[in-house]
Image (cartoon, rainbow, N blue to C red):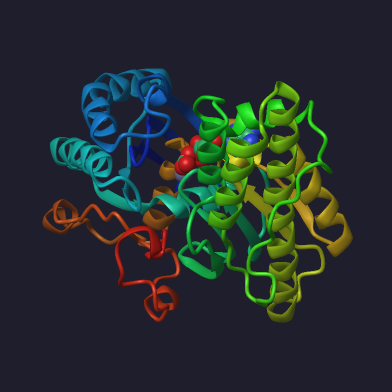
Amino acid sequence: MSKPLTVLGIESSCDETAVAVVRRDEAGRVEVLSSLIHSQVVQHAEYGGVVPEIAARSHVETIDALATEALKAAGDVTLDAVAATAGPGLIGGVMVGLSFAKGYALARDLPLVPVNHLEGHALSAKLTEKVEFPFLLLLVSGGHCQLLIVRGVGDYERLGTTIDDAAGEAFDKIAKVLGLGYPGGPALEACAREGDVTRFELPRALLGRKDCAFSFSGLKTAAAKIAYEQVKTEQDRADLCAAVQAAITRQLVERTARAMTLFREQNTVKTPDLVVAGGVAANTAIRTALTDLSARHGFTFVAPPLKYCTDNAAMIALAGLEHFAAMGNMPHNTAADMAALARPRWPLDEKRAESAPVYKTQGRKGAKA
Ligand code: KG4
Ligand code: ZN
């Protein structure tokens, strides 16, 4: 039995402004009372990717009304806390959401819980499924590509991350070269359906390594070269899309298989869960491949409903709720809450990331998360 809690969640780390209200009752049942998302896809489409300044401005224009609407849709609730994404993400957007949350918390005298966006994804399956700790998480979105062991709330071990692009970013960038529009993932998947997967051969990255690192930049360059030199017809384009999708799928499967072995070395759970989160989890070929892989390795494949796979505020509210519950009855410290910082980079497994050679560097080679 635990105290029932209701938390307002705010998400603004990329190109979606989102507000949600989530409740957990005495029996631990989670209910999403409202979850609203304002997508900026149209605003970024003509640029073929997210423009940080446009994103931040759009969050400013949207968040107030969206929060009012989400609170109204949740009904007559008494909030216990406000949770907001404090990173990692595009810093302008993160600052908008976090500042809004601070203002709201201050005005209502509510505690503020700064949430790591990746932790939101890590716990998102718990919004609808009964997932037991520890589980293996594959997070594949436009900004992140990593494998984690989730031992409990706040207890994560990152097994591997990308050393260059995220999987969704690879889909988007290759789709852009092929003139498929933005976001590229769904468009590339649709185009791949008509393609012959055996026609083009693409490179496999980091094959000799035993870890769970990802890399997609070689694939991106190779695909761009084929696109410029050999893609002349619709069929050529479909064939290349099929090859790209297969190559990304293969890499995700190979690394997840390694992660499953590492997971087994540390844990004795008989049938652990493989949870997949992030927008790329919408891809049918990837889902099918991961379902097969899970069956072969004795894992249960769990994918949250699509609306909770992609960026949303319900997952942020839930992560905040879990942290708030873990703090027990400690009185909240308004000054500390107001001092919470927006962070462009914030690895879930901070200790391990700090010892990684790329952690301190900036730019494309820095640790993505
Ligand atoms: O999680 P998400 O909505 O936003 C973040 O990046 O955090 O993920 C968006 C990404 C984009 O890169 C998009 O192209 C990709 O997910 N995506 C897909 C599919 N649907 C969305 N990639 C491949 N196949 C899809 N069907
Ligand atoms: Zn995300």
Question: Could you tell me how many numbered marks the image carries?
Answer: 0
Q: Residue at x 41, y 34 (%)?
A: 49
Query: Vertically, is 231 above or below 165?
Result: above
Query: Vertically, is 187 above or below 314?
Result: above
72 and 281: which is toward the camera: 281
**Which image quadrant for residue 132?**
bottom right
Q: Is residue 310 visible?
A: no
Q: Is residue 358 left or right of residue 99?
A: right
- Image quarter in which the C terminus is found: bottom left
Q: Residue at x 70, y 26 (%)?
A: 191
26 and 133: which is toward the camera: 133
Q: Is residue 354 left or right of residue 306?
A: left
Residue that lies at the very extreme toward the front in this rendered image: 229
Query: Vertically, is 296 above or below 15?
Result: below
**Which image quadrant for residue 227?**
top right
Q: Position of residue 217 (x, y in %)?
A: 53, 55
Q: Position of residue 248 (x, y in %)?
A: 67, 49
Q: Is residue 191 visible?
A: yes
Q: Residue at x 35, y 53 (%)?
A: 88
Q: Position of residue 113 (x, y in %)?
A: 30, 51
Q: Position of residue 349 (x, y in %)?
A: 45, 69
Q: Is residue 309 left or right of residue 366?
A: right
49 and 230: which is toward the camera: 230
Residue that lies at the very extreme toward the left in this rendered image: 335
Q: Residue at x 64, y 66 (%)?
A: 134
